[in-house]
Image (cartoon, grey):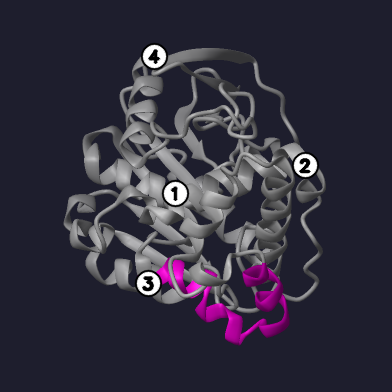
């Protein structure tokens, strides 16, 4: 089993003005002359994590990380009630990635991401395939209405008691509709008590449906009310709009990934991002390898998942 690389610190940081009043925080670690790789965090709203750069050999990679719009150290902050989310859409996120690449003078880079980061990365690659050298993704999801309904409603069959608590925050006349949209409205309510109750309930449910693998422990980030609000508001807003993508677009445009080597890693116990999503994409993307991990759930925490991801970045490190 490959182990994650030792912690490293950024040697370069900055803020990039991407328009619409948004400033994107970015940082670079590893070898300044190494192979460029950009890490796309999950959520949306999780923010860049120091642990994510440990999947790369810092001697061989120039590792770029950034906080996506309205989260982490980027401004404005979605945790603030006054922050407008109207420009927090897939098209704007893709534009931000391109602006950052141009700002840093990078011709092409490896894409690395998981969960929401996989939707973002795959959409970016389909829009700008000439700017992508390789792709490594974990817990692949597509952001389709079917997937969002599965997570917010159908998964109640797996966690009935927890789902009852989740839906209890939604007004009775909205419980048969789009639950992500209902929560997004609650999280934009003028009453801060309503917003806080909704944020806590959303994050409690999030912690539930990613908890299928052995040894799972609750995510401590949800203890922070600011992170809780930011995360819940951004996820529910994007899910309410099906990630701002036409239904099935990632699969329909899989041919645009032709010629880009890729590795997709998914846990067999990942019910937040069921393996069939990555499997269907792999059937349409012949340059990709799909690795399914026994006894692994959502995310990159299991030892076998870590090993598969590091093996992939090591394999790609010396490729053009």
Answer with mark 3 or mark 2, whichever residue precedes in sequence: 3
Marks 1 and 3 sit apart, C-alpha to C-alpha, by 14 Å
Mark nearest the camera among 2 and 4 is 2
Answer with mark 1 or mark 3, whichever residue precedes in sequence: 3
> 10 Å neighbourhood of mark 3: few (<14), some, or many (≥20)?
few
Q: Tell me if I can see residue 144 in this picture.
A: yes
Specify start and end residues of the magenta stretch as a single range.
146-168
Marks 3 and 4 sit apart, C-alpha to C-alpha, by 37 Å
Q: The residue tagged with tag 4: helix, strand or loop?
A: helix
Mark nearest the camera among 3 and 2 is 2
Q: Nearer the viewer, residue 98 or 229?
A: 229
Marks 1 and 4 sit apart, C-alpha to C-alpha, by 27 Å
> 10 Å neighbourhood of mark 1: few (<14), some, or many (≥20)?
many
Tell me: 226 left or right of 85.
right
**Rendered view: 8 above or below 13:** below
Residue occupying the point 35% across, 32% down:
92
Confirm whether the magenta stretch covers residue 129: no
User: On residue 238, which mark appears?
Assistant: 1
Q: The residue tagged with tag 3: helix, strand or loop?
A: helix
Marks 1 and 2 sit apart, C-alpha to C-alpha, by 20 Å
Q: Quadrant of the C terminus?
A: top left
**Quadrant housing residue 296:** bottom right
**Quadrant housing residue 127:** top left
Q: Confirm or deny contact between disc 1 and disc 2 (CB under 8 A).
A: no
Which residue is labeled 2 in the image?
225
Which residue is labeled 3 in the image?
146
Which residue is labeled 4 in the image?
103
């Amino acid at each position: 089993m490959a182990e994650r690389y030792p912690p490293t610190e950024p040697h370069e940081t900055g803020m990039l003005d991407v328009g619409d009043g948004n400033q994107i925080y970015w940082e670079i670690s590893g070898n300044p002359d190494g192979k460029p790789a950009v890490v796309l965090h999950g959520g949306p709203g999780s923010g860049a994590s120091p642990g994510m750069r440990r999947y790369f050999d810092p001697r061989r990679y120039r590792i770029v990380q950034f906080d996506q719009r309205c989260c982490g150290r980027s401004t404005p902050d979605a945790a603030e009630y006054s922050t407008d989310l109207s420009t927090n859409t897939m098209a704007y996120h893709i534009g931000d990635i391109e602006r950052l690449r141009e700002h840093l003078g990078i011709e092409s880079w490896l894409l690395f991401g998981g969960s929401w980061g996989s939707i973002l990365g795959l959409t970016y690659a389909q829009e700008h395939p000439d700017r992508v050298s390789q792709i490594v993704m974990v817990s692949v999801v597509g952001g389709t209405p079917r997937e969002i309904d599965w997570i917010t409603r159908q998964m109640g069959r797996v966690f009935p008691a927890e789902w009852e608590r989740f839906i209890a925050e939604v007004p009775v006349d909205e419980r048969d509709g789009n639950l992500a949209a209902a929560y997004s409205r609650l999280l934009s309510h003028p009453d801060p008590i309503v917003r806080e109750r909704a944020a806590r309930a959303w994050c409690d449910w999030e912690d539930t449906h990613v908890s299928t693998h052995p040894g799972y422990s609750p995510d401590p980030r949800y203890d922070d009310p600011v992170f809780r609000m930011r995360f819940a508001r951004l996820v529910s807003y994007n899910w309410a709009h099906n990630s701002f993508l036409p239904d099935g677009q990632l699969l329909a445009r899989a041919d645009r990934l032709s010629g880009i080597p890729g590795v997709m890693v998914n846990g067999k116990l990942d019910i937040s991002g069921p393996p069939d999503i990555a499997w269907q994409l792999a059937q349409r993307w012949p340059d990709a390898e799909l690795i399914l991990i026994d006894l692994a759930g959502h995310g990159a925490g299991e030892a076998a998942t870590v090993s598969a991801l590091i093996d992939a970045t090591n394999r790609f490190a010396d490729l053009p």
